[in-house]
Image: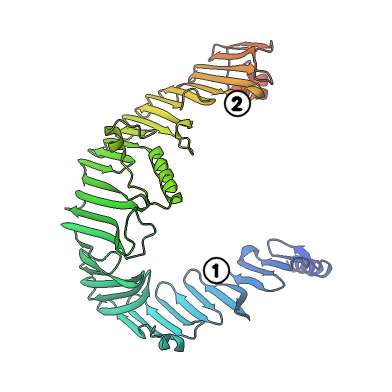
Amino acid sequence: MRFALAAVLLSVASCSSVIDDDFDISPFARWESHADSGIEEGEVFGPLAPYESRGGGEVKEYGLRPFFYTTERPWRERGLDERQKSVSILAPFAKYHTNPRTTQFRFWPLFWWTEEQHVTGGKDFDWVFFPFLFYGSTEPSQLEKDKGLERDNEYFGFFPIVGQINNFILFDKFQFLVWPVMQRVTKKVYDENETFTTILLFFGWSDGAPRGGSWRAWPVGYHAVWEYPPYRAPAYPPGADPSKPLKRYDKRGWLWPFVHIHDLFLDRGIGQEARLVSVWPFFKKQTAFDHEFWTILWPFFRYNREYPELRQRIRAVEREAASRGELPQAPESFHQLQERGEDPGIENVHIDFLSQVIYRYQKQQEVVEPPFEDYEGGFWRQRIGLVLFAEYHTLPLDRPVRVDSVSVLQPIGFFRRVVSDQNKVRGFRETQYAALVPVFFSEGKEWYDGNGVDTGRRDRFTKVWPLFSWEWNGDGSRNIQAFTFLPLRLEKYVKDFNDAWGFL
């Protein structure tokens, strides 16, 4: 035993002495050093004790897992060249992080402490013993004090009795009194504070822009409104006064989740709104200038149609009016165009009965840049049941590259036809597949020469498993087999296996 131990130690010592830049005595130790790139790597007992240095020591990572892991990196700001360091202890429970401006420590989920010094000279201090005690203080910079930008100096909390916490999650301030009896959160949006007050979590209201005036009383009712302050909307509709507030949405509901009425002013640039009326689960209807959406006895029936080309036409009218320095007129909806006998453009339709469990119909066409009547692309499909019957056809039906597919009792029976006029110069134009798995399979192909001229060559393959298969190619080759071993045309992909064992 002593002799064996001495031999191991001798081998380690000998490796270390003769190899300077790279040695590996896994699983005990590994070391690599690359002078050109300034990278050094090492491990002891695999990933348990790693070490890595990059950039000549600018970045270092090392540790003894799972007890600790340390990362050291450069920290540069306005000419300062310092270091920052992070140490994880028994991750993810404890972590210590420090740089010239910030010191943080946490022991998740019970305790964390942060001290931060801002570039302007102000300081923040936060201390939490979760979920009961919270404390923090802010010391503004002298410049902030001179400009009157001083924030609250201190906050505290003794959960759930009383408290005020600054910078809580995504809010500037969180206040509570005998939580959840009363709570209030404040967030600065645009130029003013927006507050959300809640009583017993079921009753609440909002003050300040943009959602001021909203309220809820679950499940009796709610009113949610979003109104941009003057000059704050991303876009104003034609003729709108930017010095006036502009609504984004106005939503009302009663006996939640049953009755909803929503006015959605989401297409601000063209001055259009969408209206949603819903009495769940009996029906829901949403209409806008370019689409209409219905559900009846959700999830049993769904109907959706839209006119994407109409939106492009409106954008073109906007651009033309802008080029003349004029305001465009508010666009007409597809309903108004149809009432006057005008064509609103290509129509996309989606119909479902119990999703596609019973029936689905879908027609989808692509929209391209003007001229709008010169589009091509899209598809239409229908499905009866999940597996009973389905068909798929590309649109328009005479497009250069098109697919026709029909299937019955998926995946048992199918017919697929792929036509590509663009592939003529590459040799073939049309390919057909038909199958009744696993009994029947058929494949055919039409061939063209390099100039896209029909050569008259046809390749045909038919298989009735397990009785026979025959292949009749336009190049004159023939292949007839009786009592085929593999279903469908799998021998095409396992030819060696079939040649050796097909006779069985």
Q: In the drawing, does residue 494 fall left or right of residue 33?
A: left
Instruction: Residue type at mark 2: give it.
Output: Gln
Q: How crowded is mark 1: few (under 14 residues within 10 Å), some or many (20 or more)?
A: few
Q: Quadrant of the C terminus?
A: top right
Q: In the drawing, does residue 71 fall left or right of residue 96?
A: right
Q: Distance between the residues labelled 2 and 1?
A: 61 Å
Q: Say whether disc 2 or disc 1 marks the residue closer to the N-terminus.
A: 1
Q: Mark 2 points at which residue?
A: 422
Give SS at disc 2. helix
Q: Residue at x 72, y 72 (%)?
A: 56
Q: Mark 1 points at which residue?
A: 66
Give SS at disc 1. loop
Q: In the drawing, does residue 223 fall left or right of residue 241?
A: left
Relative to 491, does residue 303 appear above or below in the rendering? below
Q: Where is residue 459 shown, x and y percent of the image?
A: 62, 14
> Quick one: 400 or 94, which is closer to the camera?
400
